[in-house]
Amino acid sequence: MRPALAVAAALLAVSLPSAQTPASSRDLVGTWTLVGMQRAGTGPEPATIPNPRGMLAFDRSGHAIEIATTSRRTPNAGSQMSPAEAQTAFANYGGFWGGYRADETQRKITYRPEGAVNPNLMGKELSRTYEMSGDRLTVAALPDAAGVEKGMRWTWERVPTLQNLSAADRQVVGFWQHQVERRVNANTGAVISETRRAPSVIVYTTSGFVGVHFPPLNRKPFAGDSPTDEEARAAIAGYVGYYGVYLMYPGTVYHHQLANLGGPTTSFKRFFEITGSEVNLNFPPAMNQGQMVRTVVTLKRLSGYEDMK
């Protein structure tokens, strides 16, 4: 196992055109992990949110992904989230992916989320201030932020690039946008069904991390800045979101989750085939209604290895 992944495993035991991303954003490019979260309140000092977890990644082509959560979430009482459980999950797990630009003079990052846990953010601009000091990046919501953003400050720490990245690693590193999910007969290849999603992405970084935002289609925005219990449950239903570390083998990638939106973390493998600018991630087949069925997720490359380092 690679050294950086061994450390991570131990912790377990819109796209904007590149021309719009100014040179000042180059220092942001790479992978960052969440080491602190605070929320300003009525007192003189902001409240520290315990057990922060998350990843943030920027590429040189103007793409970003963010996942921020805590480890204080409790298991659901039943097989599905109740509205109150969904509200708790929504309050403790957030993030998005999309385009970004950085203004070094104003020390401001402006995101344009394409896919987000909060449907109210999708397709809109989201601005935050930022400060960099060595390997630390501090990002803060603007004073007029509303909802779960209000009063928030995140502290991120840069993760170095893995040494001796293999050719297979370099092949998959980058932002990959979801195109279609197909359920096919594993024996005949016949397509049984297809699923489309709202703008969705898988990101593999040069530091050995993987991030996923897969929101479903046609989610309704919240009526207010914060969701009701039912609105939170509707926003989360069908959303696949997590971050973790990945391991590459010939034709196979393993995802080891560190945190996810839907419940307990897990590990799984996917077979992959890259053809030109597309990749097919093939799930292991399983018996369903008398036939062996395989899910195939097709994604299109938005950026690659050279954009991520």
Image: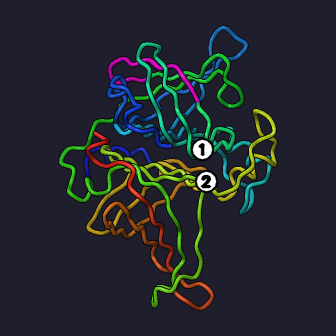
**In 3D space, how far apart are the residues under numbered discs 2 and 1 (Cα atoms)?**
7 Å
Q: Secondary structure at mark 1?
A: strand
Location of residue 20 with respect to 285 vertically, above or below: above
| Pointer 1 residue | 116
Q: Is residue 104 left or right of residue 134?
A: right
Label placed on residue 229? none
User: Residue flagged by tag 1: what amino acid is it?
Assistant: Ala
Task: Tell me what residue is drawn at x 47 percent, y 14 percent.
Answer: 106
Category of crowding for the residue at label 1, using alpha-carbon neighbours closer than 10 angstroms: few (below 14), some (14–19), many (at least 20): many
Whole-percent x, y for residue 61 in the image: 37, 39
Task: Tell me what residue is drawn at x 56 percent, y 44 percent.
Answer: 114
Q: Earlier in the sequence, mark 2 or mark 1?
A: 1
Residue stretch in magenta: 126-137
Q: Secondary structure at mark 2?
A: loop
Whole-percent x, y for residue 287 in the image: 55, 85
* Outermost residue to the top: 44
Q: Is residue 263 visible?
A: no
Q: Is residue 73 visible?
A: yes
Task: Tell me whether the residue at label 2 lies in contact with that at label 1, contact meaning CB atoms closer than 8 angstroms.
Answer: yes
Task: Tell me what residue is drawn at x 59 percent, y 77 percent.
Answer: 193
| Pointer 2 residue | 215
Category of crowding for the residue at label 2, using alpha-carbon neighbours closer than 10 angstroms: few (below 14), some (14–19), many (at least 20): many
Check residue 139 for magenta coloring: no
